[in-house]
Image: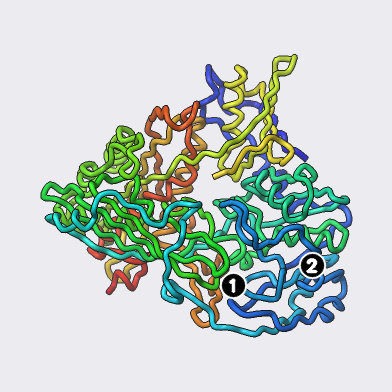
């Protein structure tokens, strides 16, 4: 069923003139807070069975045996799918035809390439029976040593980073720039692996009718998912109908169809009945992508006036043993700061993990926390205030390409955020501020940047005879309020009030909508125990024309909170003996809660960008992370006098 959001409800605000720019409330909000919004796993077609994954408990080796008979003997179990009886595919799941295609584990053999890899699927009349059947498989393994950590395998230089970007880039001569500098700094920073933990895990409900597929599954790219499934099963894309009206978070993990989702389709084909498969929380730590660990070294040279003479940013990262995605962390140094010589480079190792993929602000999130920490250190090496140093060194055009850059807007962001935060009263040296309770207080800043990524998309609009209109597009709303913003654009485009427009989305039979995709911080640190609290965040952002300021601020808040998480909380801990993630749950994989971020303020800075697109609009979902994490790290230094070198910041690092 195509989602239709009627926008002729009682409007949240009386509109005078354009719908664009109005802070309308989310039109899907009522459905969500009343429980009427139907997510993928809420669907129960007649005759549906439940599928549960059995996953590997080792990181490397092969499955020597599975007790399939014991599983099938359990009451309610209908079938067990293994490499021996998995239905045939029309295409090799290890083949790659384009940069957004990644290899999938679809029971093609008995090899284990990472922990939590699917090794069988149990299909039963009830979820409980399928879960028990999976436990009864009692797999036995031939185990090989796990390759773990950035020093756990041989270094190499990848052919590309991110999606086809060069691993090594430079302009000017960095060594000459460093040699001529009056002041130099060199620092190394480490960031951990981070895993996707959207509220809604990956799920699929699927039914076959001959060569026609009906699918309910969360997807950030319906047309891409449709094409991938069509290729794997050898059927026409138009025979595949995917519904994805609501996503309980995506953040990049639902951009491409994942192995477990395809296994659900295979299970339904095997048993000839509709099937539901939902990942458990711990099963998301492997097959659906993650942010890879990095070790980054930055070298900077500055002249006597505090201007950069050289910037060198090297990042080491990791991918899986069987596929290529390399976090483009060093590329964060391409866009913000002007220097006559800039070099960025990457090397990598291959580890026994699932393939790292896109995770909110891929490359920029990891790279910016190192870059902004180093920029702060460079400012102090020159005896300058960090804001003054950034203003002296920010780029008027993109340093590596010479393309237009919103330097005027950046300067205005600095001004507004600094004034709101009260930066002018900040002492230059660390450990000089305490609150009434004796806690060390620090103020830090970071600059946020993220490319304005665009994907080609289509929409269909109809003006009805009664003067109303309808807009249709196969778009996804991951919770950011995209459907409300799209409707505001549609209303203006059709020359109608928003209450005269119906909006339809979330289905693959609608036009292809493509893919859905700075800051000052205050921290307080207990001087005896080293416990860190972020007490205040202020960010100013310029992101082109704002369609809906209410929704935009919400996205900034989310990004800034994730930046706090990056700096102080999130870390996947790997058992170096087994290669397994030890904290694959929301009890031990820490993320911020309300008490961790008591005050967040996002300022919207006006910007007219004639270069980005006809409407002058940009996405804002990812930029909030990129300055916040560095701002928190720099505030920790200002409070304690200790420079964080690894993240998340640990109490033991502060206590020395």
Of the two numbered discs 1 and 2 on the same chain, state the one appearing first in sequence.
2
- On screen, 257 above or below 187? above
Task: Quickly name the residue at label 1.
Answer: 114
Q: Position of residue 457 (x, y in %)?
A: 60, 35
* In the displayed structure image, the side of residue 266 where residue 655 appears, left or right: left
Residue 30 at least partly seen: yes
Asked which secondary structure carries label 1, the reply is loop
Q: Residue sitting at 50 percent across and 65 percent down?
A: 319
Q: Position of residue 560 (x, y in %)?
A: 43, 49
Q: Nearer the viewer, residue 157 or 396?
A: 157
Which of the labelled discs sits on residue 487, or is there none? none
Q: Residue sitting at 20 percent across and 44 percent down?
A: 388
* In the displayed structure image, the side of residue 469 where residue 430 appears, left or right: left
Residue 532, image quadrant: bottom left
Q: Indicate the quadrant containing the C terminus: top left, top right, bottom left or bottom right.
A: bottom left
* In the displayed structure image, the side of residue 428 where residue 518 appears, left or right: right
- On screen, 193 above or below 20? below
Q: Residue sitting at 71 percent across and 51 percent down?
A: 217
Residue 650, image quadrant: bottom left
Q: Residues within 10 Å of mark 1 (few under 14, many from 20)?
A: many
Q: Position of residue 484 (x, y in %)?
A: 60, 33
Q: Estimate the spatial distance between the alpha carbons at disc 1 and disc 2, rounded to whole Å.
A: 20 Å
Q: Nearer the viewer, residue 62 or 572?
A: 62
Q: Residue sitting at 67 percent across and 38 percent down?
A: 474
Q: Position of residue 404 (x, y in %)?
A: 35, 34
Task: Quickly name the residue at label 2.
Answer: 86
Looking at the image, what colour scheme do you see?
A: rainbow
């Amino acid at each position: 069923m195509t989602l239709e959001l009627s926008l002729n409800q009682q409007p949240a605000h009386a509109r005078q003139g354009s719908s664009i720019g109005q802070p309308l409330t989310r039109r899907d909000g009522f459905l969500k807070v009343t429980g009427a919004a139907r997510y993928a796993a809420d669907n129960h077609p007649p005759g549906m069975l439940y599928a549960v994954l059995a996953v590997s408990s080792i990181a490397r080796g092969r499955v020597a045996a599975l007790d399939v008979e014991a599983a099938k003997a359990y009451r309610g179990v209908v079938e067990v799918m293994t490499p021996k009886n998995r239905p045939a595919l029309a295409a090799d799941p290890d083949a790659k035809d384009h940069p957004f295609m990644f290899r999938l584990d679809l029971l093609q053999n008995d090899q284990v390439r990472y922990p939590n890899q699917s090794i069988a699927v149990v299909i039963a009349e009830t979820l409980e029976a399928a879960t028990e059947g999976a436990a009864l498989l009692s797999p036995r393994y031939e185990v090989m040593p796990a390759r773990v950590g950035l020093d756990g395998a041989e270094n190499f230089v990848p052919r590309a980073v991110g999606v086809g970007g060069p691993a090594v880039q430079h302009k000017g001569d960095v060594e000459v720039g460093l040699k001529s500098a009056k002041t130099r700094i060199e620092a190394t920073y480490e960031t951990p692996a981070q895993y996707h933990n959207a509220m809604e895990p990956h799920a699929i409900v699927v039914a076959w009718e001959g060569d026609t597929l009906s699918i309910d599954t969360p997807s950030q790219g319906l047309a891409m998912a449709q094409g991938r499934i069509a290729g794997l099963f050898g059927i026409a894309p138009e025979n595949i109908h995917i519904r994805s009206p609501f996503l309980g978070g995506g953040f990049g993990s639902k951009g491409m169809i994942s192995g477990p989702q395809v296994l659900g389709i295979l299970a339904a084909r095997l048993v000839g009945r509709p099937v539901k498969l939902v990942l458990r929380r711990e099963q998301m730590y492997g097959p659906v992508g993650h942010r890879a660990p990095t070790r980054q070294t930055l070298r900077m040279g500055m002249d006597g006036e505090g201007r950069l003479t050289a910037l060198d940013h090297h990042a080491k990262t990791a991918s899986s043993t069987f596929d290529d995605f390399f976090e483009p962390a060093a590329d964060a140094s391409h866009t913000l700061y002007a220097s006559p010589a800039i070099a960025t480079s990457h090397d990598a190792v291959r580890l026994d993990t699932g393939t790292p993929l896109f995770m909110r602000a891929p490359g920029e999130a990891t790279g910016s926390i190192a870059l902004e920490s180093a920029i702060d250190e460079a400012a102090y090496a020159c005896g300058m205030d960090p804001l003054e140093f950034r203003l002296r060194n920010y780029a008027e055009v993109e340093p590596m390409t010479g393309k237009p850059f919103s330097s005027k807007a950046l300067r205005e962001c600095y001004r507004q955020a600094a004034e709101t935060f009260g930066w002018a009263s900040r002492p230059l040296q660390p450990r000089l501020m305490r609150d009434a309770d004796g806690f060390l207080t620090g103020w830090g800043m970071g600059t946020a940047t993220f490319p304005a990524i665009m994907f080609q998309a289509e929409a269909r609009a109809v003006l009805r005879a009664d003067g109303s209109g309808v807009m249709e597009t196969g778009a996804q709303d991951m919770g950011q309020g995209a459907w409300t913003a799209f409707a505001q654009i549609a209303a203006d485009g059709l020359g109608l009030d928003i209450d005269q427009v119906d909006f339809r989305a979330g289905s693959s039979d609608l036009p292809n909508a493509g893919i859905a995709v700075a800051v000052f911080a205050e921290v307080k640190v207990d001087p005896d125990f080293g416990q860190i609290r972020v007490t205040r965040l202020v960010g100013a952002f310029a992101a082109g024309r704002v369609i809906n300021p209410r929704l935009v601020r919400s996205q900034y808040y989310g990004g800034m909170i994730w930046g706090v998480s990056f700096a102080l909380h999130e870390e996947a801990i790997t058992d170096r003996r087994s290669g397994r993630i030890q904290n694959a749950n929301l009890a031990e994989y820490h993320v911020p809660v309300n008490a961790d971020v008591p005050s967040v303020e996002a300022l919207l800075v006006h910007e007219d960008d004639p270069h980005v697109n006809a409407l002058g609009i940009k996405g804002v979902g990812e930029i909030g992370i990129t300055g916040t994490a560095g701002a928190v790290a720099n505030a920790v230094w200002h409070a304690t006098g200790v420079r964080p070198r690894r993240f998340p910041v640990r109490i033991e690092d502060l206590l020395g």
